[in-house]
Image (tube, rainbow, N blue to C red):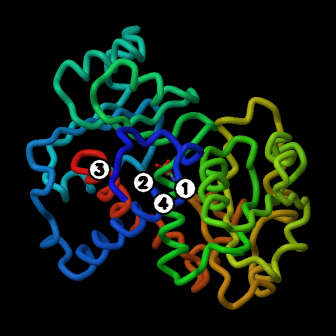
Amino acid sequence: MSWKRKHILGLEEMTADEIYTILEKSKIYLDQIESKGAGSNSEELKGYNAVNLFFEHSTRTRMSFELAQKRLGMEVLNFHAVTSSVSKGETFIDTIETVSAMDLDVMVIRHVKPGTPELATKHTTASVINGGDGSREHPTQALLDLMTIWLRGKNFAGLKVAIVGDILHSRVARSEIFGLEKLGAEVILVGPPPLIPGDLSRKGIEISHDIDEVLDYVDVLYLLRIQRERMAEVFIPDEEEYFRTYGLDRKRLDKTKDSCLVMHPGPVNRGVEIAVDIVNDKKSVILEQVRNGVAVRMALLSLLLKG
Ligand code: CP
């Protein structure tokens, strides 16, 4: 398919064809990285400029965007809200218009407020990529997760994916659900009732409040981070209790299929969502997700700027 989209704001609006186009292009970059390492760096996007605007903390998303941009030969600027004029009262729109006046081609934006990347598109001619907006969407995380599942040889049609934990506050869960359903997978949401939003349960998605019910039949166990920073109320009074009722320990892992993939977007709260000794288990693909993220972001930059 020929690529038309100028911005990557979420997976809700994306088609299955677009998702497969991204996965196939990502695979080409991943193969290049794996066969040539640093020698795979190119000048494909030489002459293009990118800015990574992070109004909220990040390790994986920010670094892998920067690496992807540099691997494609782009000039890269990094903006951190805490050291910028935001601390002097500069508004979000003023920041976007100021940065845009410097003739940037791509803006990657992470912000605590849902909808800010879309708002930015109205104040810049640059392509905007959502690096995570509040609890709304985190499309590049979901795309790298889909790529990880796909590269492990899984067929999305009928694939059973349990998303476990703090679904209410999770932009990753929302993007994941949109993407998986578009590709034909079946999603089961698992967590305590206060952490499963009503709008998702109404849409016909299977819900369980008991992780032990789903272990023996799911193909993917996707554990979410407990997002302490987004919890205005005390949804989980005791992390030890959460680990006992929803955490993945060795006993639970042993009940999953041999082929089951354990995934987590990171950062992991060790001993809360997952036992320390399981983070690097052979069923865990957590670091593969991170690795694939660079290739996915290269693919997105190339598609947005070159089609
Ligand atoms: N998964 C994810 O978005 O991680 P960071 O917050 O470290 O970017």
Task: Mark 1 vs mark 4: give the one in front.
Answer: 4
- Whether ligand 1 has any atom under 8 Å from the Cβ at mark 2 is answered as yes
Q: Earlier in the sequence, mark 3 or mark 1?
A: 1
Amino acid bearing label 1: Pro
Q: From the image, tell me which residue sits under label 1.
A: 267
Q: Residue at x 59, y 57 (%)?
A: 179
Mark 1: few, some, or many residues within 10 Å (few <14, many ≥20)? few
Few, some or many C-alpha atoms within 10 Å of disc 3 (few <14, some 14-19, many ≥20)?
many
Q: Dot 4 corresponds to which residue?
A: 17
Which residue has dot 3 on it? 301
- State the CA–CA distance, disc 2 to disc 1: 9 Å
Q: What kind of element bears circle 2?
A: helix
Check contact, mark 2 vs mark 1: CB within 8 A.
Answer: yes
The mark nearer the N terminus, 3 or 4, is 4
3D distance between C-alphas at marks 3 and 1: 24 Å
Of labels 4 and 2, earlier in sequence is 4
Residue 305 falls in image quadrant: top left
Cα–Cα gap, marks 1 and 4: 30 Å
Report whether 26 appears left or right of 264. left
> Which of marks 3 and 2 precedes in the sequence?
2
Amino acid under disc 3: Leu
Front disc: 3 or 1: 3
| Crowding near the residue tagged with mark 4, few <14, some 14–19, many ≥20 C-alpha atoms within 10 Å | few
